[in-house]
Image (cartoon, rainbow, N blue to C red):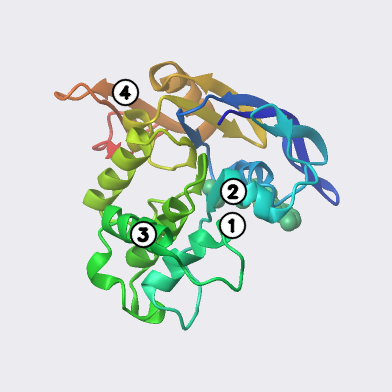
């Protein structure tokens, strides 16, 4: 499924949060949304997920304007993994993942064999099979985050929108998730803070700052020291590691050479 965002703006009273943003996500592409805190990534993702109505501009799924679509119709096309993994419920892990099947079922119908197979596969992909019967309340932050991602996989939508899905994950689960997103033929739009992870696993990056789109292109074109200085206020050291992956290390602007760089 293609996603087109055209001239999208979203305002709250007295403040413009997202301003005139236009970009395209091609079918099967993995596009990373990057930018500083407060640059508008979550707000933009929520508009793309149909959870916010843009003040102006349009979101299209496969050339169709989604304005006015029901939540169910949107959910059949796009799954959304929100930023916070905190939610309280009396459900078990498998029940939470089963919620991903909701857009395809009548509410009164029991899960059928296909639903069960899809749920089992999603649990397996997110390394959660052993936790399937655990009470949701007993899970760690990273386990909850993986369960939310498994729910999105179980939704079997054409597209998955994810808001900082790695923020609670340990480094191996971060790599597993990014490999999964990069390898699926679903269309992926994912907000990330880890620039090396974004560079390594995304086909393209969309860089936001102050609610506007600053750059859109392949990681090695978007991630330039000058842009990262202007947008994040850091001195970036961009290199290729022995495995051929782009890595971004950084120091605060003005400190280059004074201390060891931090890995992004
Ligand atoms: N409903 C709202 N009312 C007022 N301001 C809002 C509202 N929603 C978002 N904002 C503001 O809009 C700006 C962009 O927020 P948003 O959550 O989209 O940023 P972000 O790029 O996702 O940030 P982060 O990296 O911290 O998650 C922030 O300054 C935020 O405080």
Query: Are the residues flagged by discs 4 and 1 in contact, CB closer than 8 Å?
Result: no
Mark 4 or mark 3, which has the lower sequence index?
Answer: 3
Mark 3 or mark 1, which has the lower sequence index?
Answer: 1
Q: Which residue is mark 2?
A: 76
Q: CA distance from mark 4 to mark 1?
A: 43 Å
Q: Image check: 120 left or right of 84? A: left
Q: In the figure, residue 180 lies in which quadrant?
A: top left
Query: Are the residues flagged by discs 2 and 3 in contact, CB closer than 8 Å?
Result: no
Q: Residues within 10 Å of mark 4 (few under 14, many from 20)?
A: some
State the quadrant of the N terminus: top right
User: Mark 4 against mark 2, which lies toward the viewer?
Assistant: 2
- Residue 250 visible in the snapshot: no
Q: Of 196 and 26, which appears nearest the observer?
A: 26
Mark 4 or mark 1, which has the lower sequence index?
Answer: 1
Q: Which residue is mark 3?
A: 146
Query: Are the residues flagged by discs 1 and 2 in contact, CB closer than 8 Å?
Result: yes
- Residue 208 visible in the snapshot: yes
Mark 1 or mark 2, which has the lower sequence index?
Answer: 2
Residue 103 is tagged as: 1
Q: CA distance from mark 2 to mark 3?
A: 21 Å
Q: Residues within 10 Å of mark 1 (few under 14, many from 20)?
A: some
Residue 15 in picture, x, y percent from top left: 80, 46
Residue 241 in picture, x, y percent from top left: 19, 25
For image coordinates 39% across by 30% down, the residue present is: 202
Q: CA distance from mark 1 to mark 2?
A: 6 Å
Q: CA distance from mark 3 to mark 1?
A: 20 Å
User: Mark 4 against mark 3, which lies toward the viewer?
Assistant: 3
User: Mark 4 against mark 1, which lies toward the viewer?
Assistant: 1
Query: Are the residues flagged by discs 4 and 3 in contact, CB closer than 8 Å?
Result: no
Q: CA distance from mark 4 to mark 2?
A: 39 Å
Q: Which residue is mark 4?
A: 238
Q: CA distance from mark 4 to mark 3?
A: 30 Å
């Amino acid at each position: 499924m293609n996603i087109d965002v055209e001239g999208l703006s979203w305002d709250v009273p007295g403040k413009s949060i997202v301003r005139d943003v236009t970009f395209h996500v091609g079918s099967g592409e993995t596009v990373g949304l990057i930018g500083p805190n407060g640059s508008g990534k979550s707000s933009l993702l929520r508009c793309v997920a149909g959870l916010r109505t843009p003040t102006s501009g349009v979101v299209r799924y496969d050339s169709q304007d989604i304005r006015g679509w029901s939540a169910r119709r949107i959910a059949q096309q796009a799954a959304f993994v929100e930023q916070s993994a905190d939610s309280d419920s009396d459900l078990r892990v498998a029940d939470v993942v089963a919620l991903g099947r909701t857009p395809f079922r009548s509410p009164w119908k029991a899960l059928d064999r296909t639903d069960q197979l899809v749920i089992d596969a999603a649990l397996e992909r997110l390394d959660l099979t052993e936790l399937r019967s655990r009470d949701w309340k007993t899970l760690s932050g990273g386990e909850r985050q993986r369960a939310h991602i498994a729910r999105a996989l179980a939704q079997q939508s054409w597209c998955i929108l994810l808001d900082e899905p790695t923020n609670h994950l340990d480094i191996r689960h971060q790599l597993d998730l990014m490999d999964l997103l990069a390898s699926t033929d679903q269309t992926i739009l994912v907000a990330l803070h880890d620039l090396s992870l974004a560079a390594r696993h995304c086909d393209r990056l969309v860089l936001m700052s102050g609610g506007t789109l600053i750059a859109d292109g392949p990681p090695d074109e978007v991630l330039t020291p000058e842009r990262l200085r202007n947008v994040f206020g850091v001195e970036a050291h961009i290199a290729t590691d022995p495995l051929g992956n782009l890595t971004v290390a950084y120091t605060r602007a003005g400190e280059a050479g004074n201390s060891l760089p931090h890995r992004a």
